[in-house]
Image: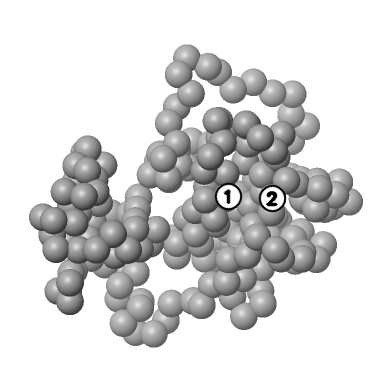
């Protein structure tokens, strides 16, 4: 259990899981524990070997951010608007409505580093069967640091027993959400009446 795995080896194990190998078989084959496997999955799932190596290099240099992910955080309008504007989201033009919507969400998850808001996601739900994730954004300066993955993992854990978990993914984000376990919704087509111009 004390064997040191490289990032490339870790990604290889996770790719085996994606290909259908059962976790129990992976534990036996690679001499890893269940906790180790799920820690890897939370940290590296969806990454390429190159991306995982870059993250490992940052960790060795002590440059990784100490990210605090919370489902119990309070948010301030100024920091929220700054995050939305940094991402070019038009809902920042309606700050009162945006703050009311976020604070009225069924769940709200935030990610902070030294108190600074770097990520935010929310959930709308009937509280029993269906949950929809309308917003998930990370400050552009902090992309590809695992922040979005950590926030989505927190939401997926909260709603793991629900019958249907839904979201609408921008084209560039499809691969990320597929790595988180989402799949295209059969033959359904997303439809909306939308006042913005940023999607």
Tell me if 65 is positioned left or right of 70 in this view.
left
Mark yes or no: residue 40 visible.
no
Q: Earlier in the sequence, mark 1 or mark 2?
A: 2
Instruction: Please state which of residues 115 and 93 is positioned toward the viewer in this rendering.
Output: 115
Residue found farthest to the top: 187
Residue 63 at least partly seen: yes
Q: Could you say which quadrant of the image residue 29 lies in?
A: bottom left
Badge 1, how many Cα within 10 Å: few under 14, some, many 20+? Answer: few
Q: Disc 2 on helix, strand or loop? A: strand
Q: Which residue is nearer to you in this view: 110 or 25? A: 25
* Secondary structure of the residue carrying numbered label 1: helix
Residue 130 falls left or right of residue 156? right
Which quarter shows the N terminus?
Answer: bottom left
For residue 107, the mark is 2
Residue at x 13%, y 56% (from the top left corner): 28
Residue situated furthest bottom in the rendering: 62
> Circle 1 sits on which residue?
158
Residue occupying image coordinates x 49% and y 59% = 150
> Residue drawn 63% across and 65% down?
70
Q: Where is residue 186 drawn, in percent x and y?
A: 45, 18
Position in image of residue 33 (x %, y %)? 24, 63
Say which of 191 and 39 sits in front.
39
């Amino acid at each position: 259990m004390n064997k040191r795995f490289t990032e490339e080896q870790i990604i290889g194990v996770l790719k085996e899981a994606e290909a259908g190998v059962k976790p129990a078989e992976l534990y036996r084959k690679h001499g890893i524990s269940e906790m180790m496997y799920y820690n890897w999955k939370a940290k590296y799932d969806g990454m390429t070997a190159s991306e995982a190596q870059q993250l490992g290099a940052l960790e060795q240099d002590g440059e990784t951010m100490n990210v605090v992910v919370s489902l119990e955080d309070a948010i301030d309008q100024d920091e929220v608007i700054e995050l939305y504007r940094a991402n070019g989201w038009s809902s920042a033009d309606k700050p009162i409505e945006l703050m009311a919507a976020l604070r009225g969400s069924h769940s709200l998850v935030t990610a902070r580093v030294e108190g600074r808001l770097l990520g935010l996601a929310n959930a709308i739900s009937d509280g029993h069967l269906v949950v929809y994730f309308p917003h998930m954004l990370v400050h552009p300066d902090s992309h590809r640091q695992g922040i979005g993955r950590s926030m989505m993992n927190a939401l997926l854990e909260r709603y793991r027993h629900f019958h249907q978990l839904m979201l609408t993914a921008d084209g560039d984000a499809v691969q990320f959400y597929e790595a988180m376990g989402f799949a295209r919704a059969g033959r359904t087509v997303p439809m909306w009446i939308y006042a913005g111009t940023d999607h």
